Image: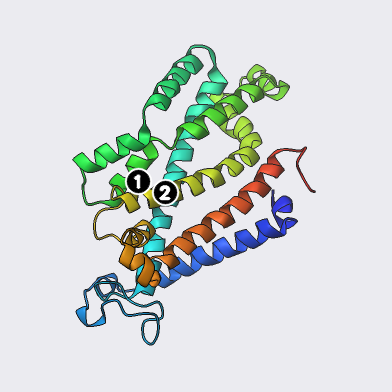
């Protein structure tokens, strides 16, 4: 996988840029006083970029650069957490279904088929409207609800194929416990495919969190998010006359997702021998 990324200039550049942005955001956010950054300053309302405010201020006089850093950190936290939890849940369910097969695979497949019919996005919006505790963890849980099925379906199919190979039959003959076979022998053979799918999940979760927050169904009110900043563009006056309040956040999302896409394409080639460049 590393060879494929290394020999693809776009993928390597995207990986370096993505890591640089993430590291910068987290280090910068660590030194920011959030209480002071969110404090209203009516004397600095809607100032254009320049002077002490490199990226200007918003309608409440808050520095836009500081808000962008805090918003990016919160959006990345949600995206990473949802991807990790959703992929882990999907991998376990997919491994169990594909390895045991028969009744277990049938029951899990029917559960996944039923869950696929449920409009998860609408379900998230309903839950966030009816019951909105002021914690980020609840927003994460709501996004995870519909985020595990893709990984589970992919791992289930690949595990089923691996189960028919000789090394699995040999391990069973030697009396190796099933859980050891699944996680020590089968799972490592799926790493390249899972890594490729993780990039898709990360980009999708980042877009979902931003979109839900933009619509008002994401993070709790008052919590900075890239979706909140992009939401300023809903006002025609701000969109036309004060682009510094929403455009940087939109460009940051675009750059992050573009970087993830380039890396994902390289990992996808690494998982498919017919597509590899190296």
Residue at 33% x, 40% y: name it: 142
Which residue position is annotated with label 2? 81
Residue lying farthest to the top in this orientation? 103
Can residue 222 be seen in the rendering of this structure?
Answer: yes
Residue at 30% x, 72% y: name it: 58
Q: Where does residue 52 sit, x and y in percent of width and height?
A: 36, 86
Which residue position is annotated with label 1? 140
Can residue 30 be seen in the rendering of this structure?
Answer: no
Q: Where does residue 36 sit, x and y in percent of width and height?
A: 25, 75
Up-down: is 191 above or below 2? above
Q: Are marks 1 and 2 in contact (CB under 8 Å)?
A: yes
- In the rendered view, does 232 fall on the left or right side of 163? left
Q: Secondary structure at mark 2?
A: helix
Query: What is the distance, in whole Å, between disc 1 and disc 2 at their CAs?
Result: 7 Å
3 and 17: which is toward the camera? 17
Q: Secondary structure at mark 1?
A: helix
């Amino acid at each position: 996988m590393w060879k494929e990324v290394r020999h693809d200039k776009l993928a390597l550049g995207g990986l370096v840029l993505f890591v640089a942005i993430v590291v910068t955001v987290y280090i910068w956010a660590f030194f920011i006083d959030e209480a002071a950054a969110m404090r209203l300053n009516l004397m600095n309302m809607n100032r254009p970029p320049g002077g002490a405010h490199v990226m200007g201020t918003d309608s409440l006089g808050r520095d836009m650069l500081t808000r962008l850093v805090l918003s990016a950190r919160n959006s990345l936290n949600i995206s990473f957490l949802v991807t990790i939890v959703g992929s882990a849940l999907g991998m376990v369910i997919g491994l169990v279904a594909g390895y045991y097969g028969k009744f277990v695979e049938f029951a899990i497949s029917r559960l996944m088929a039923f869950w696929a019919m449920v409009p998860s996005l609408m379900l998230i919006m309903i839950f966030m409207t009816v019951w909105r505790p002021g914690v980020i963890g609840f927003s994460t849980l709501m996004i995870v609800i519909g985020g595990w099925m893709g990984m589970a379906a992919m791992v289930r199919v690949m595990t089923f194929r691996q189960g028919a190979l000789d090394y699995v039959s040999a391990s069973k003959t030697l009396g190796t416990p099933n859980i050891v076979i699944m996680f020590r022998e089968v799972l490592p053979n799926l790493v390249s495919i899972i890594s490729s799918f993780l990039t898709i999940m990360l980009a999708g979760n980042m877009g979902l969190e931003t979109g839900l927050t933009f619509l008002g169904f994401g993070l709790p009110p008052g919590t900075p998010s890239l979706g909140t900043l992009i939401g300023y563009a809903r006002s025609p006056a701000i969109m036309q006359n004060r682009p510094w309040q929403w455009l940087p956040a939109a460009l940051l999302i675009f750059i992050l997702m573009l970087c993830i896409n380039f890396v994902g394409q390289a990992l996808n080639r690494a998982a498919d021998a017919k597509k590899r460049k190296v």
